[in-house]
Structure formats: structure tokens, C-alpha cells
Image (spheres, helix red, strand yellow):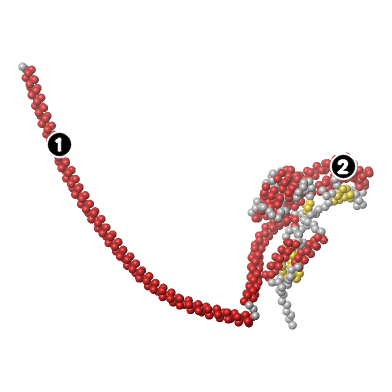
Amino acid sequence: MDALIIVLAVLVALGIGGATGFFFRASIFGKRVKNAGEEASRIVAEAEEQRKRALLEAKEEALSMRTSAEADLRERRSELQSQERRLANREENIERRSDNLDTREKSQAIREKALEEGHAQLEAMKSQELAVLEDLSALSVNDAKDILMKKAEDEIQYEVARRYRDVEQLAREDADQNARKVLTLSIHRLASDVVSEHTVKVIPLPNDEMKGRLIGREGRNIRAIEAATGVDLIIDDTPEAVTISCFDPVRREVARLAITKLISDGRVHPARIEEVVEKTRLEVEENIREEGEKAVFDAKVRGLNPELVRLFGRLKYRYSYGENILQHSVQVSILSGMIAAEIGANVEVAKVGGLLHDIGKALTHEVEGTHAEIGAEVARRYGIAPEIERAIMEHHDEERGSVEAFIVAAADAISAARPGSRRDSLEHYAKRLEALEEVALSFPGVDKCYAIQAGREVRILVKSDQVDDVTSSKLARDVVKKIEETLVYPGLIKVTVIRETRSVEFAR
């Protein structure tokens, strides 16, 4: 019973609890539904308000755009109207101008007609006057034109000659000034000895008894000397002296030194002669090497092959036209270097090319060909640069392919032209001067002519009444041209034409 009551009590409590929870949940849900409805009403109201606002803004914007479009349309209409007015004004102006042009064309036609009539009248008058002039002058129109053209040609030639003279004078002054500066700087900085060529050497003897010892029994000593040295030993009536004759300067030097040693030693016999000559030949070879090194050092050239230096030293005993080739080569090297430095060329190429330009003369009798070709071959054999080889090859050519070759040729000519470097026979010298004077005297207007400075300059005195200043320039060019065509000469020949006017009066 008690248990049933407890169960019933529990069930009643559970029912009451469930009903209470249901009503509680129902009241909470109702509140939420009410809040959601209120929120939805608020959102709908806001949306409606935004829609109205957007509609209002759209209407305002459309109104603004319409107003702007109407303003643009009015402005364009105004511009079109103004353009139409301008076009109308232009059309009026064009019409007025067209009318004016028509009027001018009519007046121009009238003027042209009047001018044509006047021109016809002038032509008729010109023909009449021309006929009168022909009658008076006894010349036709063509004859008068020929005379006038001849006079014009003479005047033009005179003017051309005058201008040519002026331009030539200016160019010559500039060229002469620069060339004179370069050459004088080079020449004045270099001084060298003047030498002359000899093919014989005279050896003094202590007494005439030594002549007999040099001859030996039945001439065996003199034959031994000549066979060992390759020279001719001349023993004549000259007291206390013997003469050595030989065209080979090295042999001549070996013989001179050997005979001097034999005279000092006093022992003269074939075996001793051969021994002394052999020793002397070795000494000369050593001297050749030393002279070559000294010359290379004087020219300030470095890096040459020792064999080439030894070969170069043989030029100490070689002469050309009375000029020592070794000294000449050193001089040409120094001149070439100075000229190259002055004009901005390759100094090293010019110096080495000038030093070796005559190296072929050391082998002239041993190898066929010109000394320039031989020298170029020697330079190639000893590893000399192609530019230097070219300068050696071309130093005697008329056409040169490099500035350095021209410099070497110029320095060679300068060295050969110095006083005393070359010898010339008096007869050839006189003939050359006479030929120069004859060429100058063959031109009309020449009064006197003088060849001076060993034929390197010709001074011509002209007659002032036949040759004027302009014609004198043309005369100088003509003389130069004829000299170049008819004569053969070394170096350059300067032609100077002198014209003077003298006025003489007497006081009484």
C-alpha cells in the first residue's frame, strides 16, 4: 500500500514537472516568435525606405543627365550656326576675290599684249641698230663674239693663273714652313764626319832595307803576302813606304795591319806571314763585331740578332761615293727617328729601317740583286718586323707604301746631300750646270740664268717688260716641268724666277 502511494506520488510529481516544463518552453518559444516578427517588420520597413531613396536618387540623376544633354545639344547647335555663318562669309569673300581676279586677268591680258607689241618694236629697233653697228665696225656678230670670247679667255686665264699663284704660294709657305722645321730640327741636331773613299793604303817603313825583306828571296815574301791577303803590294821608288791596293776594304785593312805587324816584328817569311795574316783576320772580324755593336748602340736600337749586328759591322769598311756606309747608316737612323718623332710616325720602325737600309751593301758582291732587295731578304732572314723590311725594300722606290719608308728615303737623301759626302767629276758637274741653264734660257722672256748650289737651285732673271708677276709663276712651273722631262738629276732642284722693275732718272 505504501509502495503504491509512493509510486502514485512519483507519477504525480513527474506529471506536474512535465507540465511545468512544457508551459515554460511554450512561453520562451512565443517570445522568440514575437521577436522574430518584430525584426522582420523592421527589415521590411528599412528595405522599403531604401527602395524609395534609391528611386528618388535615380530620378534625380536622370533629371541631371537630361539637363546636361540638353545643354550640350544647345551648345552644338550654337556652334553649327556659327560655322554656317563663317562659311557663308567665306563664300562671299571667295566670290568677291573671283570677281577681282577676273578683273586682274583682263588687265593683265591687256598689259601682255602691250608688252608684246613693245618687244616687237624693240627687236625691230635692235635689228636696225645691229645692222648700223655692223656697217660702222665692218664686223659681223660672230666675229665680234669671237673677239669678245678671246678677250674673256685671256682675262680668265690671267685670273686663274693669278689665283693659282696665290693658292700655290700659301700652300708652299705652309708646307715649306713645316718641312723646314722638321728637317732643320733633324739636321741641326746631328753632326757627322766627312769621309772620302780610298782604294789604296800607304804603309810607312822604318828604312828602305825593309822593302827588300818584304820582297824576299826571288819575291817569295811578296807573293806570300798577296796570296794570304788578296791584295796587291806595290813597292816602287817611293822612299820608306809601300802601297797596298785593293777594292775590298776588309782585305785592305787586314793586309795593312798584318804588314805593320810584320814590320814591327822583323821576322818576314812565308810561314810567319800566314800566321800573322790569320791572327790579323780574326782581329778584324772581332773589330767588325765591336764596330757593329757600337753603331747599334749609337743609333739606340735594341733587340737585333748578333749575327745581323756582325754583318752590319762590315759596313765600317765599305764606302759609297766617298761616304762611309756605317756612319751613313747611323746618321740615317738618327735622322729617321727625329723626323718620325716630329711628324708622329712610328719612331722605332723608322730608326731600325734607317739603320739597316743599306745592310744589303755588306753582301752586294756575294748575292745577286739590288742592295735594297738583298737588305730586305737579310732582314726577313733574321726576324726583322715586316714594317721595317718594307722600309728597307722601298727606300729607293718612287712609290712607297708607308710613312716610315718615305721617312727613311728622305733621311737617306739628306745624309747623301750633305757637303763632302759624295764626289763628282768636274766635267760631269759642269755639264749638269750647263744643261740646267740651257733649259731655263730656252723660254721667252728670260734674260739671264744661273745654276748655283751644285746644281740644286736655278735662279732665272726675267725681262720685266715681257714677264709680269703672274706669268713669272707660270714660267717657274714650266721650267720645272721641262727639267723633270729632259734631265736626270739626284735630289731636288729649286727654280727661282726673279723679276725686278727699275726706274732711272737723271738730275740735271
* Residue extending farthest right: 218
Which element type, helix, strand or loop, lies under badge 1?
Answer: helix
Q: Please tell me which residue is depicted at 69% across the width and 48% down the height of the picture.
A: 389
- The numbered mark, 1 or 2, whose residue comes first in the sequence reads 1
Instruction: Decide if residue 168 is in sight here.
Output: yes
Residue 164 image offset from top left, x and y in percent: 65, 66
Residue 185 image offset from top left, x and y in percent: 68, 57
Q: Please tell me which residue is depicted at 66% across the width and 61% down the height of the picture.
A: 175
In the rendered image, which residue does mark 1 sit on?
A: 32
Q: Find the distance from the CA under tag 1 to the CA under tag 2.
A: 156 Å
Q: Is residue 15 left or right of residue 64?
A: left
Image quarter of residue 443 = bottom right
Circle 1 crowding by C-alpha within 10 Å: few under 14, some 14–19, many from 20: few
Q: Is residue 26 left or right of residue 133?
A: left
* Residue extending farthest top: 1
Q: Is residue 151 above or below residue 326?
A: below
Q: Quadrant of the N terminus?
A: top left
In the rendered image, which residue does mark 2 sit on?
A: 273
Q: Is residue 259 above or below residue 339?
A: above
Discs 1, 2 touching: Cβ within 8 Å: no
Residue 341 image offset from top left, x and y in percent: 66, 53
Circle 2 crowding by C-alpha within 10 Å: few under 14, some 14–19, many from 20: many
Instruction: Decide if residue 355 is in sight here.
Output: no
Q: Quadrant of the C terminus?
A: bottom right
Q: Is residue 145 above or below residue 454?
A: below
Image quarter of residue 424 = bottom right
Which element type, helix, strand or loop, lies under badge 2?
Answer: helix
